[in-house]
Amino acid sequence: MTSAEHVDVLIIGAGLSGIGAAAHLAKDLPGTSYAVLERREVSGGTWDLFRYPGVRSDSDMHTLGYRFRPWRGDTALADGASILDYLRDTAREYGVDRHVRHGHRVVSADWDSTTARWTVVAEVAGEQRAMTADFLWACSGYYDYDAGHTPHFEGQERFRGQVVHPQHWPGDLDHTGKQVVVIGSGATAVTLVPALASSGAAHVTMLQRSPTYVLSVPAKDKVKGRLTRLVGEERSYVATRWKNIALQSALYRASRRRPDLVRGLVRRTNVAQLPPGYAVDTHFRPTYDPWDQRMCLVPDGDLFRAITDGRADVVTGRIATFTETGLELESGERVEADVVVTATGLNLQVFGGAELSVDGERVEPSSTMAYRAMMLSGVPNFAFTIGYTNASWTLKADLVAEYVVRLLQRLRATGTRSVVPVRDPDVEEVPLMDFDAGYVQRVVHTLPRQGTRAPWTLKQSYLHDARTIRRAPLDDGVLRWS
């Protein structure tokens, strides 16, 4: 192992969170030495990894964009290439790109209390390299980049067509003139179906085990366009951002307090955009309440248009087996296919799969409690960025970055070497994420816990967090400075 380089702050991941974190350091803590370790050979994270047709945001760009750097234009749900350009332009503007070390897969990080430093080991071209840092910041998201979730399907080996997962879309896949079946009903599926249907597929079927809430939203934000002409790009961005935050928050609160009302609203919008007599309650009426799982947004109702035009359809039922030419459902219905896309979800992976330890003792995430959903009890000089499940990821990422900057400023100003949240034994623990999505439920037992009272609770509310996190005192009796 080569000798260790030292930096003030070491960031894991050069995607949406990592670029944002580094930009905050560059603009708010000039003179801070930092590096960004990225396991892939390019930056951009999710927005470079996902290459499937039609890939786009499932949150509006005026809240998915950084608070400090406006998303220009009035496009609400942007395509993946545009988002990637935005991220890389941000990295260049703030000099972050010069600090990214590509091809560095972090495998372990150990905190040494005697030196008040992290030693981080990364695999680089088959070798291990170490770096040390005063502060470690995990910005690697929460899913496994190596493989998506693909359940076993009976008889799949006898299918004569091609089976692909959206997370690793083959660049040479030609779906022109072919019958395509997309298994799934989440954000990826509702994006893929209209994109494939409008780009040459003979027909596309969305095959779902159960329905998801799907809501049509305008592809362009007309208010943003008008405001830009009146007050300019930056002011219109701020106003549009707050407008959309308010609308998102209102919809979420209404979903929790009056689920029947929201369910009826979504159903009416679906009925209005689908052919007369369409079986809306079979294919678009979930058994769960709105926002028990993430709601899918479709720009200008493109999914509904594809169904209405006859280019796509939805089949609801459980798969019994693959056949040589498609799939057979438990009902006996057969769905023919040349290509099957398993849009069946993601695998969660905390901290990019890196193993954390403190003074040589391994940290089991499930044995820790999350402080303000961004630090771990008993783990010094460490933060992680996890976004909201009911709103844009970047809203929380910006708040985490602002808070970490405050921590680092305090450490620097006082000459303090470390800060760690100390768990209160009287605070009861509950699962970190109260979210019914399969990718969460499969691994929720392995995640850090949250507490039953502040500052150990995770609030899925930007409006709440914007008040409490920004104003939170750093001497709150929970953070121990030493």
Image (cartoon, grey):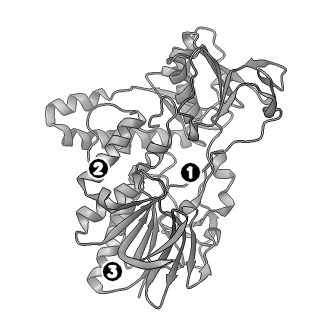
Residue name at image x 52 percent, y 29 percent: 191
Compared with 271, 42 (above or below) is: below
Front residue (pair 45, 213)? 45
- Is disc 3 placed on a helix, strand or loop? helix
Q: CA distance from mark 3 to mark 1?
A: 34 Å
Amino acid residing under circle 3: Leu
Query: Label 3 belongs to which residue?
Result: 411
Q: CA distance from mark 2 to mark 3?
A: 27 Å
Above or below 278: residue 414: below
Residue 217's spot in the image, x, y percent?
Answer: 43, 27
Amino acid marked by disc 2? Thr
Q: Earlier in the sequence, mark 3 or mark 1?
A: 1
User: Is label 2 in a helix, a strand or a loop?
Assistant: helix
Tell me, yes or no, whether the two marked residues, 2 and 1, touch with CB atoms within 8 Å.
no
Q: Name the amino acid type tagged 1.
A: Tyr
Circle number at residue 90: 2
Check disc 1 and report its element: helix, strand or loop. Answer: loop
The residue depicted at 32 percent of the width and 29 percent of the height is 221
Tell me the mark number nearer the camera, choosing from 3 and 1. Answer: 1
Residue 35 position within the rendered picture, expressed as x and y whole percent measured from the top left: 36, 67
Which residue, given by chain and number where applicable, does mark 1 sit on? 145
Q: Residue at x 78, y 36 (%)?
A: 153
